[in-house]
RNA sequence: GCCUCCUUAGCUCAGUCGGUUAGAGCGACGGACUGUUAAUCCGCAGGUCCCAGGUUCAAGUCCUGGAGGGGGCGCCA
């Protein structure tokens, strides 16, 4: 096949030269103008056909969705709306597309409809933009950490540990479910299973990352994560991607600095390298906002919101300070909260987080030092023995985008917490070894990748920022 | 898991109090036009009213159950 020039490169290519492009037809206007897209960028290339000199049967096959190879001379556009256009002198139909049944037509489609045809939605402006931005964010994450000498750790997807304590797990087995081998006591005999023990899909790479950090100092994981929770929201997936940095000798303040630096870097990266896509997503969002009631509308355009996050420090405060603010807040006093804030120790609901982020501070917030009762066993106990060195980064519209902590590095205190919370210490002896042999203070966090993509693209449903979402009752494609 | 709303043409949606042959816009198709920008103009076709029961002289409309989807809450990233 002839050498293909990507449409992205065509726009800066030398004119009065021949090029070959390949892609899919978005529209064929006026029997004369083919809008061709190859996904390399948002913009379509306009290919011009002198229809009087072309076979009518060929022109009829140039329909929305058809795959074409076009050769021609690139010229400065004679019309408005684009800088260059390709004067086609050779057109090959690589793949026909019957417009009677092709679901994507040159018109606006709802996100709900496109979600049902997720295998084709890559071909729309919105989703091609989202997935280019998603790629850029993934790449920027590796670049951010690589530039800071972090080591990328591949934590296992299949785990033999059932004590990670981050939610319900998917079981992994090769046992015949119709003929499950059993022990004499009637329990399942996992010795007959593939790994010789019960195994699950990982719910977090954190514990493995800690092992790496206590030798390599600065490490991160970035991989798929699985939660078998029956969560039905626009912010949860059963299969999602998580970034988990873990750094030896870092305390909670270092951890907050790292999280804030990283988020600002990633947002800046996308503003710089995905300018066209972000501009398009901003426009899409503002059109969507127009039909909403005034009270539900976002106060800022997408790029303004992103820039605001970069240019302002995140608000850092303790759980205790947050409770005071919430207790004295107007909605709490007027009984507007579904869960009124009465006393210290209550878990914060999303309505409380949203009030702090969207109404009170109007910027990203980092909440720290939560009561130990509502946080995981591995978080470092504060001196008051009541709170732990946890941190949650809260973003407008998204809620919790990062959850992390300084880890409990003191062996005795960690074991005590595990026993209090009924975590089996024998099974976790490999984890406890790090506290037996040269333990050091360290800290880390988990960033939900799709929640980041949600925020940056201005989308509102997490199922629209991953190609093929998995959620309760659905594993299509 | 809980609460709530929705399901009518390929898509987005009207459809009044239960009453004759179920409508619109967009898209598709046919034609005209030919420097268009989701082209425009004219014309035409297109329906398992989500499924299964029930009430009724009569059900897209009312009732019961089921399926699918949206939004909110919980769990969290």
Image: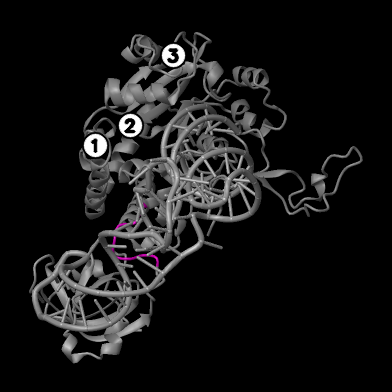
The quarter of the displayed image where residue A434 is located: top right
Q: Position of residue A374 (x, y in %)?
A: 53, 20
Disc 2 residue crowd, few under 14, some 14–19, many 20+, Cα 10 Å: many
**Pointer 2 residue:** A396
Q: Residue furthest right?
A: A184
**Pointer 3 residue:** A340
Q: Position of residue B60 (x, y in %)?
A: 48, 51
Mark 1 vs mark 3, CA separation in Å: 30 Å
**Pointer 1 residue:** A305
Q: Earlier in the sequence, mark 1 or mark 3?
A: 1
Reply yes or no: does residue A283 show up in magenta.
no
Q: Which residues are magenta?
A: A103-110
Tell me the mark number nearer the camera, choosing from 3 and 2: 3
Mark 3 vs mark 2, CA separation in Å: 21 Å
For the residues labelled 1 and 2, say whether their Cβ atoms are less than 8 Å apart: yes
Same subunit, tags 1 and 3: yes
Residue A431: which disc? Answer: none
Rendered view: A131 above or below A7? above
């Amino acid at each position: 096949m002839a050498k293909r020039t990507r449409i992205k490169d065509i726009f800066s290519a030398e004119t009065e030269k021949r090029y070959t492009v390949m892609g899919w037809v978005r529209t064929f206007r006026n029997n004369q103008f083919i809008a061709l897209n190859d996904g390399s960028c948002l913009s379509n290339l306009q290919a011009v056909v002198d229809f009087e000199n072309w076979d009518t049967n060929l022109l009829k096959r140039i329909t929305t969705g058809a795959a074409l190879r076009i050769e021609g001379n690139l010229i400065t556009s004679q019309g408005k709306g684009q800088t260059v256009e390709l004067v086609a002198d050779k057109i090959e139909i690589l793949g026909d597309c019957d417009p009677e049944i092709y679901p994507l037509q040159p018109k606006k489609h709802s996100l709900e409809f496109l979600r049902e045809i997720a295998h084709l939605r890559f071909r729309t402006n919105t989703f091609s933009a989202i997935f280019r931005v998603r790629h850029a964010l993934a790449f920027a994450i590796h670049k951010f950490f690589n530039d800071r000498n972090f080591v990328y750790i591949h934590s296992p997807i299949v785990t033999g540990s059932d004590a990670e304590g981050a939610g319900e797990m998917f079981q992994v087995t090769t046992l015949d479910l119709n003929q499950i081998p059993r022990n004499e006591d009637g329990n399942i005999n996992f010795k007959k299973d593939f790994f010789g023990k019960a195994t699950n899909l990982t719910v977090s790479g954190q514990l493995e990352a800690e092992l790496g950090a206590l030798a390599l100092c600065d490490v991160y994981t970035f991989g798929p994560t699985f939660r078998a929770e029956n969560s039905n929201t626009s912010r949860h997936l059963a299969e999602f991607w998580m970034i988990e940095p873990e750094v030896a000798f870092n305390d909670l303040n270092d951890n907050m600095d790292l999280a804030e630096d990283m988020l600002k870097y990633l947002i800046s990266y996308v503003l710089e390298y995905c300018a066209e896509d972000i501009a398009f997503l901003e426009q899409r969002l503002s059109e969507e906002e127009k039909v909403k009631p005034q009270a539900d509308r976002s106060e800022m355009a997408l790029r303004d919101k992103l820039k605001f996050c970069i240019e302002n420090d995140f608000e850092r405060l303790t759980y205790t300070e947050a409770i005071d603010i919430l207790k004295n807040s107007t909605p709490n006093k007027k009984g507007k909260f579904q869960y009124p804030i009465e006393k210290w120790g209550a878990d914060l609901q999303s309505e409380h987080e949203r009030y702090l982020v969207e109404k009170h501070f109007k910027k990203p917030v980092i909440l720290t030092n939560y009561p130990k009762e509502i946080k995981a066993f591995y978080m470092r106990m504060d001196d008051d023995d009541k709170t732990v060195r946890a941190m949650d980064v809260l973003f407008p519209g998204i809620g919790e985008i990062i959850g992390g902590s300084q880890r409990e590095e003191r062996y005795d205190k960690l074991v005590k917490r595990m026993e209090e919370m009924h975590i089996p210490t024998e099974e976790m002896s490999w984890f406890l070894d790090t506290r037996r042999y040269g333990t050091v203070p360290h800290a880390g966090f988990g960033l939900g990748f799709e929640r980041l993509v949600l925020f940056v693209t201005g989308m509102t449903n997490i199922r629209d920022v991953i190609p093929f979402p998995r959620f309760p009752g659905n594993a299509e494609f």
